[in-house]
Each structure stands twice: as structure tokens, then as C-alpha cells.
Image: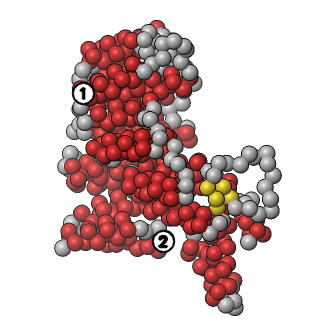
Amino acid sequence: FTWIYHAMSTSSTVFPDWRVNDFVQRALTGYEPAVRQRFRDFLHDAMLTRDVDLFYPLASQVREAGEHGDYEAIEALCRNIRDGIERGLLVPGPALDPKVPKSTWSPRIVDERVWTLLVYGAIRSRKVDVAGMIVQEMKAVGVRPSIRIWNYILMGMVKTGAQPRMLQVLNKMREDGHEPDLMSQTIVLRALFDKRSLAQARGVFLSITGSIPSDRPWTDEETTALRSAYNVVLNGLLRCQLIEEADKVFATMGKEGPAPDVVTFNTLLNRYAHMKLPQKVKETLHIMGDRNVSPDIYTFTILFVNACHLGDDAMKHILMERMRELDIKANTALLSAAIYSILANGENDSLKHAMQLLRLMEKSPDKEARPNEITYNTILHKIRQQIEDKTIPFAAGHEQMEKIYDGMKRRMFRPNRVTLHVMMKQYLTHPHPDSLRTATAIFNELCTERVDNDDTWYIFLHGLNRRG
């Protein structure tokens, strides 16, 4: 086992079950079943201990699972770690000093980073209950969740609309010996603004500003946390069209409160652009210049999206020129965000403008500005959502989804499970018989590649049922 572990520690290679089984069938044909199973167990344990020990292979797996909403993979990792602890392969505890040499073999440490990573992955997958299960697993092996883990769970509740349960989490935090910190209060503040609970939101913000130390300089951590709270308040007030109140809060920044940064100005610009207040956009840009706050890629993204909404091609050209002067490249992230914002706007010509921008990206001579897999997935998901909401005609949306899907394959992008799920769902709702054949082909592809999960079967069977 030690030999296998050290051999695997030089690589981050992952061996899924189907690859292992295929190898066992070919290479270990003459061995007893118990020996074959022993090999499987050794390989599984070696990968698990390596991933926990090196951390970065584990982080890569969790981030990918989170991005694709694969909460089952997060649950499986948590179960494997708990099993490893029970068998003595792993031990919970603080991280070892990297300068201390490790023995040939000793149980690998599952430190706080690992638990925090798993909770983060569950929240990225929008599964607060899975995050709660991970916390229970931590406690079962004697590990106390940190304030950071509790804050991740609070964030997840905001994202998934589970705000009513936040009070329970805050109580559990206190029972666990953690008083909600500035980050916790800021997350609650965001949730209250989302629910338009203005009186309560104002009360929480008053509590935050009242806790600002006045007898000493703020630490960098305190300044960052306070500024985040102010930015949330500005965004929340402007979402509620409370411009005068937002102006008053902004006026205190740099005096009683923290100085505004580029995120503050981006928040204001984004809200004023959505509210179609060009004069306020100009005023904000002037203040930004007066305070010597340099724009970033997100500033230009907001202004570019605004120009797209207004159909102002001249402004788009000016912005691109200004970005070149500042050596800020119009990268894939900016243009993908612009496409998403255009589609989210929900106007009659939003699909046309989004597709025009996608075509420009595809023809761009700059590789850094060309669409990637995330760009295509974002557009497909948003168009599908608009078809379901009936904000765009089914036929027009379906035609564009087919063009995007075909374009992905022509450009040698390998559609992942998220893409295939969206397209399978779309084809299942299209009445033409050929669409059913295409949906079935996608389902078969998912099963053949062994990337199907419960959602795959649900989408396919539910779609067939609706077709009758």
C-alpha cells in the first residue's frame, strides 16, 4: 500500500470506477476475486489519502463538482473521508508543519481546509442540506465547525432562497460558541434586502455601524468586511429605488465609514444602468475619477452592457478604445457577462443582441476574447429559461439553441453533463419526432460516457411522460 501511495503522489490522476474495473478485468484475470477487490481497495485508499494530503487534487475535484452542480460527488467524498477516519487511514486534526518530514506511512491529516472545501462545494452545488450533513459528519469525528463554515452555509441559504432558516443557523452558531461576525451580519443583511425587509435591514446595518471601533485604526480585515457591508446596503437600497437614502450612505464612506473602492463604484454603476439613469452613471464616473479609483474589467463590463442595452455602438467603440489605453483586455469573462446581462434584461431584442455579440466573440482574432465552454453553457441555460418563462418564442429560442450547440461541436468543445441536460430537456419539449430521436441520442451518450446521474434519468423520463 505504501508503494502504491508514493507512486500516486507524483500525479493528480483520477481513476474512476469504470477505468479501474476495466484494468482489473484485463490485467488481473488470473487472480482470485479477493485479490482483485484488495487491489481496488488499495487504489481507492491511495487516491483518497493522496488527495487529502496534497489538497490541490481534492480542491480541483470539489470545484468541478460545484460548478456542475454535482452534489452527489461532494456527498461521496465526504462519506469516503468519514470512512477513512473510521478505518484509521485518515485522522482529523490541525495541519502538520510542512517543514516536519513525514514518516514512510502515517495516517494523513484531515484539517479544517478539507471540511471547509467540502462545505464550499456543497454550497456551490446549491445544496444547503448537503452542507449541513457535512457539518454533522465533522461534529461526529470531534471537529468543531469554524465561523467560516457557518458563513458559507448562510451564503448558501441566501442563494437558494432558504432565508427563513437563517435564524436557526445563527442560533446553532451561538450554541457552537461562535458569535456572528461582520461577514455573518453582512450575509443576513443581503438576505433581508432580497426579501425587501427594509426595517430589519436598516436595523442590522445600524448594528454594524455601531460596532465600528472609534478608539483605534481599523485592521485591513475589518476595513474589507465593513466595506462589503456598505456595498451590500448600497445595492439593496438602489434595488428598492431608494436613491436618496443610498446617496446619504455613500456620502458617509471615507468619513464615518470605509472609503469606497472599485467594487463600490461598480455596484452604483450597475444599479444606475439597470434603472436607466444615464445622468447618475455620469455623476458616478466623475466621482470615481475625482477619488482616483481606477476602473477594472467589471467597470467596463457594466458600461459595455449598458451600451448594448441602449444600442449605442459609438459608446461601445469608445469603451473598447479606453480599455486598450488602460491595457485592460476585453476578455472572455467580460464578454460572457455582457451576453448574460443582455439576455437577463428580458427585452424583445435581447436574444438578437446577445447572438450578435457571440458571433463577434467567435470571429475575434484575440484568443483571450473567444467564447469558452462556460460562455456557451451560460447562453444555452439562459435561453432555455426564457423559453420556459415564455419571454421569447419557443421556435426562435429553439433555433438559436441548436445553432449554439452545433457551433460548440464544430469548435471541438466537448459538451459536458450540464450542456447535455439542457439540450435533452429542450429536445424533449419540441413536438417534432426528430427531436425525440435527438433527445434519446443525448441520453444514450450520457449513459455510454458514464456521466449520467439521477437528474439525467429524471429529465429523460419526465420528458417522455409529458410527451405522452
Q: Nearer the viewer, mark 2 or mark 1?
A: 1
Residue type beneath disc 1 = Leu
Q: Position of residue 361 (x, y in %)?
A: 46, 40
- 372 relative to 127 in the view: left or right: right
Judging by the rendered image, the residue that carries numbered circle 1 is: 198
Residue 444 found in image quarter? bottom left
Instruction: Describe the element under mark 2 as helix, strand or loop.
Output: loop
Q: Position of residue 219 (x, y in %)?
A: 56, 21
Q: Position of residue 205 (x, y in %)?
A: 34, 24
Instruction: Look at 67% across and 78% down and name the residue there.
Output: 39
Q: Dot 2, crowdedness within 10 Å: few (<14), some or many (≥20)?
A: few
39 shown above or below 367? below
Instruction: Look at 64% across and 86% down and name the residue there.
Output: 34
Q: Is residue 411 visible?
A: no
Instruction: Look at 55% across and 52% down and name the residue there.
Output: 143
Instruction: Describe the element under mark 1 as helix, strand or loop.
Output: helix
For the C terminus, give its image quadrant: bottom left
Residue 300 found in image quarter? top left
Q: Position of residue 69 (x, y in %)?
A: 42, 55
Judging by the rendered image, the residue that carries numbered circle 2 is: 450
- 254 relative to 166 in the view: left or right: right
Q: Nearer the viewer, residue 432 or 188?
A: 188
